[in-house]
Image (spheres, rainbow, N blue to C red):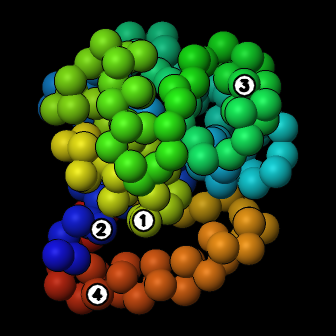
Amino acid sequence: MISRFCPNLYFESLYQIDLSHLKSIGIRGIVFDIDNTVTMWGSDKVPQDTLKWLEDTKTQGFRVCLLSNNRKARVDSISCMLDIPSAKGFKPFGSAFRSALSLLGTSPKETAIIGDQIFTDILGGNRAGLYTILVQPLSTTEFFTTRLFRKLERIVLHKLACRGMLKP
């Protein structure tokens, strides 16, 4: 049961993800969460290092899209700014991930999700058969319910670490 919450990889930062490794294991598409993964929660500013990393991802031939539970207007705004399409759906439900896969034109086995939340990004990605990558959130500023879930998340991460299931 706890394995449903276990990411394939866990990093402190987006910048630590080795794109050549993802390519070598057959990943062709990457789904990105927005809040506290690509940009800080509630912010429309994307850090310059993140902009460069996302551009490198596209330059290396990965198909990319955004998937967020945030308001459509905000998601569309960031999607337009980054020139990255966005899929529709509510994570962790399967329809959100099927929408992203359809947009990318990739299968679950050749698609990764990168996000900062176990109960949305990782659980949903694992259930959909995607390669899951957890990154630490960019900021501690978050939606009220997310802050509540972070407490449970810390417990789950601790259990995963104690069982040797977290792979950096």
**Badge 1 or badge 3: first in the primary sequence:** 3
Asked if the residue at tag 3 contacts the one at tag 1, i.e. Cβ–Cβ closer than 8 Å, the answer is: no
Label 1's element?
helix
Q: CA distance from mark 1 to mark 3?
A: 24 Å
Q: Amino acid at mark 4?
A: Lys
Q: Amino acid at mark 2?
A: Phe
163 vs 95, left or right, is left
Q: Amino acid at mark 1?
A: Ile
Residue depth check, mark 1 versus mark 3: number of the one nearer the observer:
3
Mark 2, other Cα within 10 Å: few <14 / some 14–19 / many ≥20: many
Q: Position of residue 106 (x, y in %)?
A: 26, 18
**Badge 3 or badge 2: first in the primary sequence:** 2
Asked if the residue at tag 4 contacts the one at tag 3, i.e. Cβ–Cβ closer than 8 Å, the answer is: no
Residue depth check, mark 3 versus mark 4: number of the one nearer the observer:
3
- Residue highlighted by disc 2: 5
- Residue highlighted by disc 4: 159
Depth check, front residue: 68 or 114: 68
